[in-house]
Image: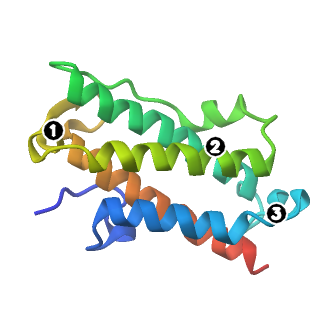
Amino acid sequence: MPPTTPYTPDLGDRDPIRAIRETKEHINTMLRDWPAASFERSYAPGKWSARLILTHMAQVELGLGTRARMAVTTPDYVAQPFDQDAWIAHETGLSGPDALHAFVVLAQMNVAFFQGLSATDRAKGFSHPEYGSLTVDWVIHHLAGHQVHHLRQLEQISTT
């Protein structure tokens, strides 16, 4: 039975690694030819622009990919939580095209890492101060659902 994450409703019953690969490709295809100004549009008033969504997605790829690598290689690993709003506040200079590129490259790196993991690796546990006991497989499912969640926002922006 797959783990339950905050993004389980977004992922559904899809294979998480396949979903990461497909979502990354869909986002890249959808946005790669956008003019720079289009990345500043949002899906709703007061919400992040496409540029900030992509920056956040790249940050999450970096953070959760590192978390999974640490869990696989570090006995008794305790994850460090991060504040997404504090992180995004310090990355205001990244352009939309660069944010897209960062997300795509980091997601590809994570896909390659996740595909190489054994069932034992995916079952490795670690602890998180907010979520409690987790596994690497939980991280993979969480990351996949997170991508799908933000894909829907980017699709909204692309149609406005």
> Colour mode?
rainbow
**Residue drawn at the location 16% of the way across and 19% of the way down:** 76
Q: Amino acid at mark 2?
A: Ala
134 and 29: which one is in front?
29
If you read the primary sequence from the N terminus, does the residue marked by circle 2 or circle 3 appear first?
Answer: 3
Is residue 128 visible to us here?
no
**Residue drawn at the location 10% of the way across and 63% of the way down:** 1
Q: Is residue 114 above or below residue 65?
A: below
The reply to whether dot 1 and dot 3 touch (C-beta < 8 Å) is no
Q: Is residue 120 left or right of residue 103?
A: left
Q: Is residue 77 above or below residue 4?
A: above
- Dot 2, how many residues are within 10 Å of its Cα: few (below 14), some (14-19), or many (20+)? many
120 and 128: which one is in front?
120
Please provide percent x and percent y for residue 67.
35, 31
Count of labels shown? 3
**Residue drawn at the location 40% of the way across and 30% of the way down:** 66
Q: Is residue 32 left or right of residue 102?
A: right
72 and 134: which one is in front?
72
Please provide percent x and percent y for residue 17.
33, 59
Q: Amino acid at mark 3?
A: Arg
Residue that badge 1 annotates: 121
Tag 3, which secondary structure?
A: loop
Please provide percent x and percent y for residue 101.
67, 48
Residue that badge 2 annotates: 102
Dot label at residue 41? 3
Mark 1 vs mark 3, CA separation in Å: 40 Å
- Dot 3, how many residues are within 10 Å of its Cα: few (below 14), some (14-19), or many (20+)? some
Q: Amino acid at mark 1?
A: Asp
If you read the primary sequence from the N terminus, does the residue marked by circle 1 or circle 2 appear first?
Answer: 2
